[in-house]
Image (cartoon, rainbow, N blue to C red):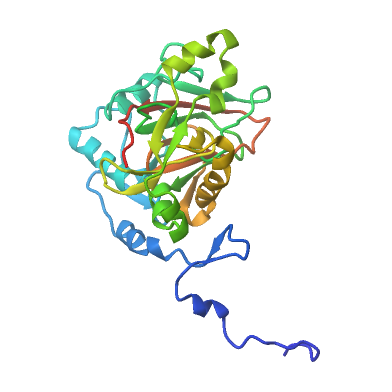
Amino acid sequence: MPPADVEVLATYDSSVDLEGKRKWTPDKRMQLGPVGHIADERESLLDRSWEHFDADLLAPTVGAVLHGIDLSGHLPTEVIDDVQMALDIYKVIFFREQHLTKNEHLVFARRFGELEVHPFLPSNDLQPELVRFDKGPSVGGYENNWHHDVTWRENPSRSTVLRCVQSPSIGGDTLFADMCAVHDGLPDDLRTEIDGLSAIHSFERSFGSQVPDERKGEFRALYPEVEHPVVCTHGRTGRRFLYVNRVFVDRFVERSHEESIDLLDRLCRQTDYPEYQCRFRWEPGSIAFWDNRAVQHYASSDYWPDVRVMERASIMGDRPVA
């Protein structure tokens, strides 16, 4: 029994009034309630089985760990096709105990397409297609922001294979957000506001400080600002996905940077909901293979001054289309 001086007004759980729908907080900045639109996809993924490997789903619509496959050898075409299909439906797939050499890493990644060379990130000395993230006491991790990679390119990377060389004792996880589920869950007012809208992406947002003043014109000519739709269509699955991030988007078309900040913030906040995310704990030999269109990622920077060493090969893609 409650204390005598406490009046209990509630006679039922008020969330019954939501009937499975989401609602805004009073300030209209966040939504609460069940994320019901992912239910069918969740059940479909739970029922999925594979011929050449097993898969353990990490989250309702994004992320699965594949077991029973060795990436170091020459995989038959039908296995590569199955891996690609798994990537299509899970959006990011993970492997454990894959202690690949640098060359084996590249050989596996090349089975899915031509590899890119990143002009603003350090690579392995002998393999320019392998970006190396070597973090420790003197080099902090600044990748702790939600983003698609290299959206400042006219043809951003299609997918990425990231290998753990050395992991911290704790921390340094990578999170992934399902941008298809984010798009499908957009509130009606946001969906209307971005209909047909495009955004301007620029390398200078993150990498401009690396370019000497006397070479800025040269690099702007090599990598000019590029326009991509805010909502794109996935070339393999036909799914629609949200394609903006705070890292590389400077502004929306026909709007100034200042005029774009509020809308960009409201869109990017959609990625923050844990219901759209999975989280992966790294160990040496772990590999993440993600679709750079269907997911954004966030590398947690909670391990400094511990050491975290990763190498990344990215598969070149096509220009995003609405």
Residue 307 in the figure: left or right of residue 196: right
Whether residue 78 is visible to the viewer of this picture, yes or no, is yes
Number of disc labels:
0
Q: Residue 224: x and y, percent?
A: 44, 21
Is the residue 31 above or below the residue 105 in the image? below
- Name the residue: 54% across, 50% down: 266
Which image quadrant for residue 261? top right
Q: Nearer the viewer, residue 74 or 158?
A: 158
Farthest residue toward the right?
A: 5
Q: Quadrant of the C terminus?
A: top left
Q: Residue 287: x and y, percent?
A: 42, 35
Residue 90 in the figure: left or right of residue 17: left
Farthest residue toward the top?
A: 214
- Name the residue: 31% across, 27% down: 108
Is the residue 18 above or below the residue 251 in the image? below
Which image quadrant for residue 231? top left
Is the residue 305 above or below the residue 10 in the image? above
Q: Residue 39: x and y, percent?
A: 37, 64
- Name the residue: 59% across, 11% down: 213
Residue 199 in the figure: left or right of residue 159: right
Q: Quadrant of the N terminus?
A: bottom right
Whether residue 53 is visible to the viewer of this picture, yes or no, is no
Q: Residue 294: x and y, percent?
A: 38, 43
